[in-house]
Image: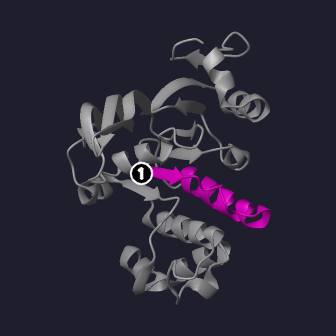
Amino acid sequence: MLDIRNLTVEVEGKTILKNLSLSIGFGETVLLMGPNGSGKSSLIYTLMGHPRYIVKEGSIVFKGKDVTSMSTEERVKLGLGAALQFPPKVYGITLRALAKKIVKDEAEIEALASSLNLTNFLDREINVGFSGGEMKRAEIFLLLLQKPSLALLDEPDSGVDVENMVLVGNAIGRLLSDSSRTAVEKPSGLIVTHLGYISRYVLTHRTYIMQNGRIICYGPTENLVNDVLKHGFDWCTKCYGDRFPCTYLGDKV
């Protein structure tokens, strides 16, 4: 589904991603964890083709096609979709109006909005006056309507209270376990998270740890999430790979 090879990215002359490699198979969902400022969100923007993020080296291959130089619109048509951590406010366009641009079925829109407690937001301007949690739910709502082949989710579990975390987590789980698609069509996911709470609601195949613009290790989600919560991210740089099946990719401290 997605194959990132030796990716180096700059923003305004500053290197923010360094020789990064990561692969996601069809039907796989992976977590990407790391401290603030480690480059997690930058990877999402790069994958979506944001013009500020300049690929200096490496490649991004999606569904067998090199998309490194493609526009955002071309990537979306291929099946990439993203729910951003800080989506923009859109004045003059309601959530319902945008939803109808994605699907025509009003009943589907209403049902999905209801499942995310967004019914009362459908006729409001997008993200205008929304709380952080409400914006997160609106982003997930639009992504679910889009039904992308690969869903890129930027910290869906941050700024969300417990009740709405259940709604968001279950909604993401439904998207990524869509049984109506064949094995080759089955959606994949890359979920950026700081503390990994979303892993309680979504089945993931592995977790990558990122620091200073690099992937430093990957391994089983449950082990990595639990140990990061207990010891912090610096723990990963000391390579405890002998404790469980973790592959370390950085320089030992």
| Residue placed most toward the observer, 148 or 159 | 159
Residue 141, percent from left and from top: 54, 69
Q: Residue at x 57, y 71 (%)?
A: 135
Q: Residue at x 62, y 73 (%)?
A: 134
| Residue placed most toward the observer, 51 or 207 | 51
Quadrant location, the C terminus = top right
Mark 1 Cα shell of 10 Å, populated few (<14), some (14-19), many (≥20):
many
Residue 132, percent from left and from top: 62, 69
Residue 130, percent from left and from top: 59, 78
Residue 58, percent from left and from top: 27, 29
Q: Residue at x 55, y 64 (%)?
A: 140
Q: Quadrant of residue 241?
A: top right
| Residue placed most toward the observer, 45 or 98 | 45
Q: Amino acid at mark 1?
A: Ser
Q: In this picture, is 16 found above or below 169?
A: above
Left or right of 174: which side holds 87?
A: left
Left or right of 74: which side holds 226?
A: right
| Residue placed most toward the observer, 215 or 140 | 215
Q: How many marks?
A: 1
Q: Quadrant of residue 158?
A: bottom right
Q: Residue at x 70, y 64 (%)?
A: 167
Left or right of 211: which side holds 224?
A: right
Q: In this picture, is 73 found above or below 9?
A: below
Q: In this picture, is 106 found above or below 177?
A: below
Q: Which residues are magenta?
A: 150-178
| Residue located beneath label 1 in the image | 149
Quadrant location, the N terminus = top left
Can residue 185 be seen in the rendering of this structure? no
Can residue 97 be seen in the rendering of this structure? yes
Q: Is residue 35 on the magenta stretch?
A: no
